[in-house]
Amino acid sequence: MDRLPTRSRLVDWGMNIPSSFCLCSLLDESRDHLFLQCEVSEAIWASVLFCLGYSHWGFHTWTAFSEWMSLQDTVVSLTLKRMVAHVTISTIWMERNKRLHDGVSQSPEVIFKRIDRIIRDAILGRRKTDLFQPLMQEWFRFE
């Protein structure tokens, strides 16, 4: 619903802060740029989508991303797709906050390793359910 307090929204609310994005400093920090269009976010998504088995991705807007999230396809299960998307979005937001508030930054490769670990842990937490085996196989399929 575009309610995250991104810098461009804070500027619109009258705060006297720079609106440039702290991951790449190229454009204003909007939701679409933060999660989908920034070079750091794009590198993270490229790694994530490769692990899911996608050769390319066509979402650079939140609307396109939402449509991709709800699309049932033959590449990966909807459960894993949504889990990975959730973890990726929240990890990018955490990286943004670390850079903004702590001045600490990590490379897209390190961020992807964190995403991979969270996904593995989430799947392992379901090892006593029927979802475990297929989800783990899907996640490891292109490793």
Image (spheres, rainbow, N blue to C red):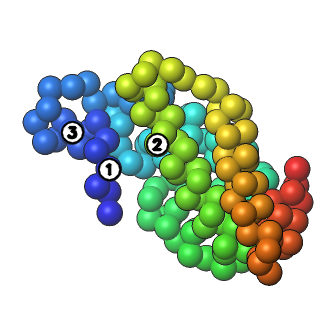
Up the image or down, 129 lies above or below 65; here it is below
Residue drawn at point x = 31 percent, y = 41 percent:
6
Residue drawn at point x = 87 percent, y = 65 percent:
137
Query: Which numbered disc, 1 or 2, marks the residue that appears first in the sequence?
Result: 1
Residue on which disc 1 sits: 4
Residue drawn at point x = 76 percent, y = 54 percent:
120
Cα distance in 3D space between marks 3 and 1 = 10 Å
The reply to whether residue 58 is in sight is: no
Taking the image as shown, residue 40 lies to the left or right of residue 19, namely: right
Mark 3 crowd level (few <14, some 14–19, many ≥20, 10 Å Cα): some
| Quadrant (top left/top right/bottom left/bottom right) for the N terminus | bottom left
- The amino acid type of the residue labelled 1 equals Leu
Cα distance in 3D space between marks 1 and 2 = 10 Å
CB contact under 8 Å: marks 1 and 2: yes
Between 58 and 87, the residue placed more toward the observer is 87
Up the image or down, 115 lies above or below 137; here it is above
- The amino acid type of the residue labelled 3 equals Leu
Q: Where is residue 59 in the image (x, y as percent from the top left)?
A: 55, 57
> Which image quadrant for residue 55?
bottom right
Q: What SS does tag 2 mark?
A: helix
Query: Which numbered disc, 3 or 1, marks the residue that appears first in the sequence?
Result: 1
Tag nearer the camera, 2 or 3: 2
Mark 2 crowd level (few <14, some 14–19, many ≥20, 10 Å Cα): some
Query: Which numbered disc, 2 or 3, marks the residue that appears first in the sequence?
Result: 3
Residue on which disc 3 sits: 10
- The amino acid type of the residue labelled 2 equals Trp
Residue drawn at point x = 23 percent, y = 43 percent:
9
